[in-house]
Amino acid sequence: MSNRPTKPSRPPAPTLALTPAPHPMAPADAEPGGGVIAVTRALQVLEAFALGESSLSLAELSRRCSLHKTTVLRLARTLAQSGFMVQREDGDWRLGPAAGWLGARYQAGFDVQNVLEPALRELTLATGESAAFYVREGNVRTCLVRVEGPQALRHHARIGEGLPLDKGSPGRVILAFSGEPGKAYEEIRRKGYHWSIGEREQGVATVSAPVFGMHWRLMGSVCISGPASRLPAEKLEALAQTVMAAATQLSYALAGNSAAPAQSPVRATQWHP
């Protein structure tokens, strides 16, 4: 047996947790989803204004955006340089003219003044109810243009407000002619229209039909709306033909074809995927 002293074993080297280095080309202000933090925050400030609000204080903007006051102030001043916000004499902030022009250019993409408003005005005269045109924006629908009816008691919708697609006839028509599966949507495609009473808002009745553009691309839905007391189911069924006729005329106009016969017989709209 050897009496040579054994060499003490070394403890294992500690393992270091390696944190992956950021991509060398990724900017410092990039969000995980590929967006830019500063732009997202600036849009938060613009979207903090509710419909009907003329101005907001810096403190209220900060609260609604969940951002520090200094951050909101810096964003507001930057937006003001391009005319998207304006600071009033009392220190509060309001939306600037550039925000209005942006909305106007958005509406111009649908030819609101030349096509949509005149068509909705005719529909209002024909039915005696308010008429509106809805478009899909992601997972919501928004009212792009609206013409109020002559009745004192009528339903009011806010232009630009995001509303659910699966509640109310305008949204369900958009879903149906976007290819939404299901028996209910198959029935809407078969008939070419849909009506609802109190589905999204209690006491409100609507009937809607789809509007197409070039190559049968779905543009949105046209609808009339009013109180359910004045528009029971049988009245909505009767007015559906008028709404479909208006949707057909709008489809021809938005597709750039004015040759649609004004007195052509109305038939159920066929869905062209």
Image (cartoon, rainbow, N blue to C red):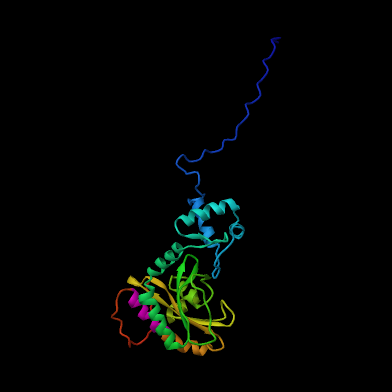
Residue 117, image x, y percentages: 40, 78
Q: Is residue 46 left or right of residue 244?
A: right
- The magenta span reads 243-254
Q: Is residue 50 visible?
A: yes
Residue closest to the eye, 221 or 90: 90
User: Is 250 contained in the magenta span?
Assistant: yes
- 224 shown above or below 138: below
> With 261 as the anchor, is 42 left or right in this view?
right
Q: Position of residue 32 (x, y in %)?
A: 52, 49
In the image, taking residue 127 as reference, residue 114 lies left or right, namely left
Q: Residue furthest front?
A: 89
Q: Is residue 135 magenta?
A: no
Residue drawn at 35 percent across, 72 percent down: 213
Residue 248, located in which quarter of the rendered image? bottom left
Residue 136, image x, y percentages: 46, 69
Residue in front for this viewpoint, 69 or 200: 69
**Image quadrant in which the C terminus is located:** bottom left
Q: Residue at x 46, y 88 (%)?
A: 128
Residue sitting farthest toward the left: 259
Quadrant location of the N terminus in the rendered image: top right
**Residue occupying image coordinates x 56% and y 51%:** 71
Query: Can you see residue 271?
Result: no
Q: Count of labels shown? A: 0
Q: Residue at x 41, y 86 (%)?
A: 242
Residue 175, percent from left and from top:
47, 72
Q: Quadrant of residue 16?
A: top right
Residue closer to the observer: 135 or 12: 135
Question: What secondary structure is the magenta-colored segment mainly?
Answer: helix
